[in-house]
Amino acid sequence: MRMIIINEKLAIPKREIRFTFSRSSDPGGQNVNKVSTRASLLFDVDRSLSLSLEHKARIRNRLTSRIRHKGILRITAGNQRSQKANRDAALKCFVRLLASALREKPPRKKTTVSKAAKEKRLQGKKHRSRIKQARSEKIKI
């Protein structure tokens, strides 16, 4: 069984991934009209045996726009002229997307604005105010 390595902790068996092919609208000249070269990678997130519930939730949350209502993640590649190259491109994109979706984000450190920064901002506002006041004053002769 061949595995697709996502990161050091996760590998997905190739049998969980399905490919479909269709005609591409991308480069290829007359070949585009005759050969189905565009590759669509389909991965059922909800039914995957290699993902934990936490992984599934994280993927669903971060890749919402790419997951259909039935829980199927779809990635399409059609830039290359051959079916194999498009399949490889879709697979590479799949690995990159899952790795980034599963990466834990470090907790945000709360910060405050320094006194100097507040003072600088207020000085800028006062300066701007003076410029506008000077513009609006009528010239007395």
Image (cartoon, rainbow, N blue to C red):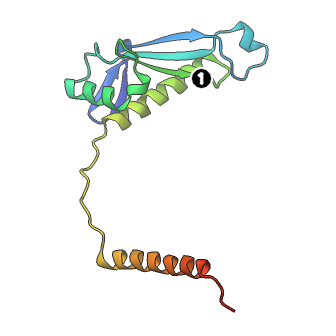
Task: Judge left or right: residue 73 versus residue 140.
Answer: left
Residue 77 coordinates in the image, percent (x, y)? 57, 23
| Residue that extends furthest to the right in the rendered view of this protein | 30
| Residue that extends furthest to the left in the rendered view of this protein | 53
Q: Does 31 appear above or below 6?
A: above
**The residue under label 1 is which amino acid type?**
Ala
Q: Quadrant of the C terminus?
A: bottom right
Of residues 48 and 13, the one nearer the viewer is 48
Residue under the point 72% across and 23% down: 27
Residue 58 coordinates in the image, percent (x, y)? 28, 31
- Mark 1, Cα crowd under 10 Å, few <14 / some 14-19 / many 20+, is some
Of residues 95 and 97, the one nearer the viewer is 97
| Residue that extends furthest to the front in the rendered view of this protein | 141
Q: Quadrant of the N terminus?
A: top left
Image quadrant in which you'd find residue 42: top left
Q: Secondary structure at mark 1?
A: helix
Residue under the point 30% across and 74% down: 114
| Residue that extends furthest to the bottom in the rendered view of this protein | 141
Residue 57 coordinates in the image, percent (x, y)? 25, 27
Task: Judge left or right: residue 89 versus residue 3.
Answer: right
Image quadrant in which you'd find residue 13: top left
Residue under the point 29% across and 77% down: 115
Residue 99 coordinates in the image, percent (x, y)? 36, 35
Residue under the point 20% across and 23% down: 53
Q: Which residue is mark 1?
A: 85
Q: Does 108 appear above or below 88?
A: below
Of residues 53 and 50, the one nearer the viewer is 53
Q: Does 127 appear above or below 100?
A: below
